[in-house]
Structures are given as C-alpha cells and as structure tokens.
Image: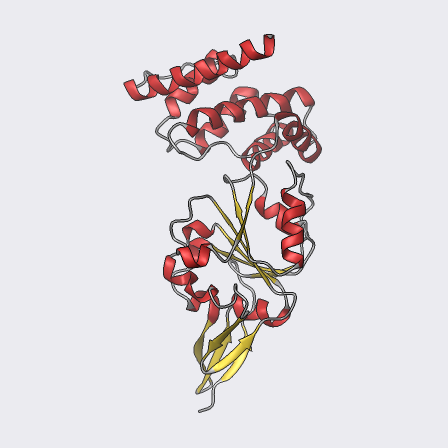
Amino acid sequence: MKPKYTHSPPNANQKNQRSSSHQVYRPRDSEFQALNALVEKGQPTLLAGPTGCGKTTAVESLNRPMLTVIGGTLKNPQDLLGRFVLKRGESEFIDGALLVAMDKGHILYVDEVHEARPESLSCLKSVTDHRRCISVNGQVRAAHPSFCVVAAGMPPFRNMSPELRQRFTFVPFDYLPAEKESDLIMSVSRIPRTEAEFLVRVGDCTRRSLQTVGSASASTRALLQVAQGMVDLGWSRDQAVDQLLWKLAECQAHQAMLQVLISAGLYSRPAVPQTKEELKGRDILQQMLDDDEQASAV
C-alpha cells in the first residue's frame, strides 16, 4: 500500500508553540543579539551554558514559532524524523518534530541536547549545512527558508560528533551579574530587594563551591522558584536555603557548601560533620570569599 504522510500532533516533548512566557530574557551581554541574528539567517545555533541560566527563555523571547524536543527523550533518529504507524490497515508515516519544523519554517529547539544519544542526532547533519534537506523514505524533504535548528545544553557536548558540532555557531550563556539577577528575581516574584539579594548571594556561594567539583549549582530558575515560595508560602530564609540544598542534595560537595553558607551568615542550622574532601572544598571556597572581601575593601 502507498504510505501516507502526515504531521504528528504536539505532545509533552514536542510542542508547536509561539512564546507565551511571561518572562522576557534579560541579557548578560550581547548573547541575545547574537542569537537573534543567527536565527534570522537560519544558522544552526548552539547555546552553551549552565542549567537554568535563561537559554530557553532567550529562545522563547525571539517570539517565533518553535517546536521543542527534550534531548533526554531522543534515543534514535526516528524520534526526530518520525515513524510509520498502522492506521485502518494502511501504513502511514507520521512526521516527527524535525520534518514538521522544516515544512512550516519553525525553529526546532533541542533542549538539553547534551542528554541526547549520539545516534539520534545524526539526522541533523544534512539539514544544518548548505543542503538544508533530508531524504526520508525515498523523498527529499527541503527546509522552509525560515527553518532553523537551535540546541541548548551544558558543555562539552561529547555526544555530538565533531562533524555535527562544526555545523553550529556557539553562543555562550551564563548567570547574570548579582545586581541584574536580583532585579530579575524581584520583578518576577515581587520579593523585597533585601531577600532577592540574599538569595543571589546564596546562589553565588553554591556556584563557587560546586564549580570545583563540576556539579550543577543553584540556577536562576531555582532561585526564582524559591523566591516565589518565600512570597506565596511565607518561607523563612533558612527554609528557602533548605529548598535549594534539597535541589542539590545529590552533590558530593553538599556538606562543604553548607558549612560555607553557615560561616558566611547565610544559614543558621547546624551542619553534620564533613569528610576530608568536603573540608578541602570548604576551605577553597572560604579563601575565595575572603579574597573577594579584601578586593572590595580596596
């Protein structure tokens, strides 16, 4: 039987969306302008930065139609291309997110691309170079002029082959400077400035301590969630820190980070004894904080 070709409906991991986020991206430097210019030209773009620093918000702030797929759900090329299904005795090919975005001229946004299996990304090679097309079931599918692939995640992207990485333009992202991050938390959660600045200082402590062991730290996203809890649920500062620590509970530097928060006057509850490795991490971070205070005094 002759196969039919249809578009797949959006689902939890594949969304046909125009941004409806109430947040507008607040740039740290010129990264948003770079992203906008690259998407305008259809240039494949890779946003590289820590979790929760605003990569997805930046893409949504472009206010362009986009299809989002989550890297952790991509196991093979069919998860992007689509697959045959049997309907009423006929074989019907259901287009995946890649083909739908190509046909409609949408952004294909691959979030958390570092979690995708390498083989699942192989189908992006021919659509991210000068060809901008792909052969599927004997048919050549060409991309709409407005189509663009944007991926985001945390480096070093070892799951992307060198050939695929070289097709992308890298745009680095990072957390906002303290003052801008405080302003963002205030505007979104309506929390007082003193509390926003407190949360940003806590976040900075976790980022410094966990950077030494390569673990995820308190993201801007996490700080916003905790700030909302302080407003809506009346959390105290210690309860807010408890929430952040719970989010990072699997981290090997957890106790070292807790000790630093206590010594910096950001947490008042007693900490449990630490291992030698955690004590070493605490000492390294404490020295960094001391150096900052001396620099500020000068």
- Residue that appears at 50% across and 13% down: 291
Residue drawn 38% across the image and 49% down it: 158
Q: Closest to the observer: 236 or 69? A: 69
Residue found at x 38% / y 61%: 75
Tell me: residue 181, above or below residue 153: above
Please give left or right for residue 296 compared with residue 4 in the image. right
Q: Where residue 150 sits: x, y (%)?
A: 56, 55
Say how many tags the image has: 0
Which percent across, then down, holds residue 188? Answer: 68, 35
Residue 215 coordinates in the image, percent (x, y):
40, 34
Q: Is residue 3 above or below residue 167?
A: below
Is 183 above or below relative to 171? above
Which residue corresponds to the image point at 42% horizontal and 22% vertical from the top-left?
A: 257
Q: Using the rendered view, name the quadrant where residue 229 is placed.
A: top right
Tell me where residue 265 appears, x and y as whole percent: 52, 12
Q: Residue furthest bottom?
A: 1
Please determine whether, in this image, residue 134 is positioned above or below residue 256: below
Question: Which quadrant of the rendered structure holds the N terminus?
Answer: bottom left
Where residue 19 sits, quadrant-wise, is bottom right
